Image: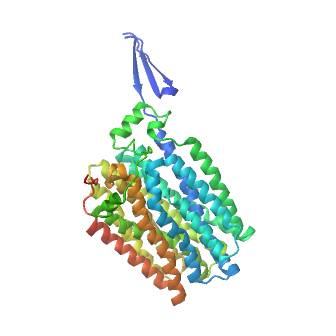
């Protein structure tokens, strides 16, 4: 019996593998999908690192800034919230502009803008100037979440979408986890101004990398037909990343606000962002002023909940996609991880009853793990229920409402600390907001299915 040889050699440019059978003298071509979607996701992940570094750098610098500039807790809370107020009110406009100009240009403008504003903070010496600079950071960071959702919806099929959202969401915890000790070291060694100079400069580099490399699926020349078919057949909205040039009317906005599913998400995401911004703004100060830790020691302890939150973000996305793969409805696969995450977030209240710093950190880590799990799957859920042609606007409205939580959280905590002289009631407030999130996803948002707006 003659030997049979199968020769396989790659044609890398086309992502093809050609097999030759020496008996039949036939050439068979089997196309292997490229992995371009994961490269595009890596760009988004890179942006999320610098994005949250520029949001959270003020929290690290705050204990020293309070002393140098003579800021009391209530005033510091207002400064923390300046970013979130401008961010929240600009998100709907950013979402609408995203639908018009597309994600590549949207992110380029945003990253350059917030990076310049971050550098400007290092040149300020007055409260008024600080408020102005942080407000500008919020304005230019407003396109972040709508653009992320838009890109993932365009590049990823349903079965991979929650994991993709989990991966880029985890970067916010990477930024504030791994890099908080680094920022604390910069603070102790060079002063608070240098924190803003360095993080702002890094953002400008990221803007260049993004603009040179990101493309929408329809405009991408390195994706092959096999991958395009795979993501399209899997539910990716391959045309959603493309600028439409459409002008969104206030009537359309009103229709979206009347959708019960979106209202449930609005309330739920408000809760998610309230919890997040406690950690992003007051947590280092809680450890240093509330628990008596040094700046460096506080920086290292603050790192732990953020690192645990990375696991929450990745596990939440993977768990949701696993349930989708196993045939569970999207109502189950999306809502169960979110509700579980909120339940875990209520554990933050346990820190009030812990005598040791280790017990406090365990409670905080469990709570932040839950917040990250809920936050991750929320991004995938929006892609599942938002009208196909209004992903940018829907994401903008969702994050507008959610970031009212971002804005009010540091203010409320600041006034509570000012009024009570401690953080105990602040943790009660955060725990109650977590319960509100559970109610939103159980009683308001019921069945998960895509919204179709009436045309009239």
Q: Residue at x 54, y 69 (%)?
A: 280
In percent of width and height, residue 35 lies at 47, 38
Q: Does residue 130 appear left or right of residue 101 in this picture?
A: right
Classify 385 as above or below 415: above
Classify 331 as above or below 20: below
Quarter in which the N terminus is drawn:
top left
Quarter of the rendering containing residue 333:
bottom left
In percent of width and height, residue 208 lies at 62, 47
Q: Does residue 330 appear left or right of residue 107 in this picture?
A: left
| Colour basis | rainbow
Quarter of the rendering containing residue 256:
bottom left
Q: Does residue 389 appear left or right of residue 427 in this picture?
A: left
In this view, the residue in front, 342 or 105, is 105
In percent of width and height, residue 99 lies at 43, 50
In this view, the residue in front, 245 or 123, is 245
Residue lying at the far bottom of the rendered structure: 420
Instruction: Specify whether residue 370 is in view.
Output: no
In this view, the residue in front, 20 or 61, is 61
Classify 254 as above or below 65: above
Quarter of the rendering containing residue 374:
bottom left
């Amino acid at each position: 019996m003659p030997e049979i040889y199968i020769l396989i050699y790659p044609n890398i440019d086309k992502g093809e593998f050609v097999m030759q059978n020496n008996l039949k003298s036939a050439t068979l071509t089997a196309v292997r999908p490229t992995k371009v979607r994961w490269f595009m996701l890596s760009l988004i992940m890179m942006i999320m690192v610098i994005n949250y570094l520029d949001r959270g750098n003020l929290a690290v610098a705050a204990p020293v800034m309070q002393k140098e500039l003579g800021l009391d807790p209530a005033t510091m809370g207002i400064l923390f919230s300046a970013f979130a107020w401008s961010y929240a009110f600009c998100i709907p406009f950013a979402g609408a502009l995203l639908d018009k100009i597309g994600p590549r240009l949207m992110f380029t403008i945003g990253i350059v803008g917030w990076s310049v504003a971050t550098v400007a903070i290092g040149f300020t010496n007055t409260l008024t100037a600080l408020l102005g600079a942080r407000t500008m950071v919020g304005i230019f960071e407003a396109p972040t979440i709508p653009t992320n959702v838009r890109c993932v919806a365009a590049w990823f099929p349903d079965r991979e979408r929650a994991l993709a959202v989990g991966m880029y969401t985890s970067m916010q915890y990477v930024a504030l986890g791994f890099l908080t000790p680094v920022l604390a070291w910069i603070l102790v060694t060079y002063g608070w101004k240098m924190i803003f100079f360095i993080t702002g400069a890094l953002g400008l580099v990221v803007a260049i990398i993004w603009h040179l490399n990101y493309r929408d699926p329809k405009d991408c020349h390195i994706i092959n037909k096999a991958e395009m078919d795979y993501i399209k057949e899997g539910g990716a909205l391959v045309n959603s990343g493309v600028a439409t040039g459409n002008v969104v009317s206030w009537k359309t906005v009103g229709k979206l606000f009347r959708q019960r599913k979106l209202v449930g998400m609005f309330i739920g995401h408000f809760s998610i962002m309230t919890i997040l911004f406690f950690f992003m703004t007051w947590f280092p100060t809680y450890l240093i002023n509330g628990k008596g830790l040094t700046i460096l020691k506080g920086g290292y302890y603050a790192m732990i909940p953020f690192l645990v939150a990375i696991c929450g973000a990745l596990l939440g996305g993977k768990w949701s996609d696993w349930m989708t793969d196993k045939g569970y409805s999207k109502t189950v696969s999306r809502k169960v991880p979110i509700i579980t995450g909120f339940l875990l977030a209520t554990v933050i209240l346990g820190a009030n009853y812990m005598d040791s710093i280790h017990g406090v950190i365990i409670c905080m880590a469990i709570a932040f793990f839950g917040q990250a799990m809920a936050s991750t799957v929320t991004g995938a859920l929006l892609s599942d229920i938002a009208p196909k042609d209004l992903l940018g606007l829907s994401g903008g409205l969702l994050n507008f409402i959610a970031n009212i939580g971002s804005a009010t959280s540091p203010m409320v905590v600041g006034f509570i600390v000012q009024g009570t002289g401690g953080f105990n009631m602040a943790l009660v407030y955060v725990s109650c907001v977590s319960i509100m999130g559970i109610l939103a996803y159980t009683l308001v948002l019921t069945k998960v299915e895509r919204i179709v707006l009436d045309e009239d």
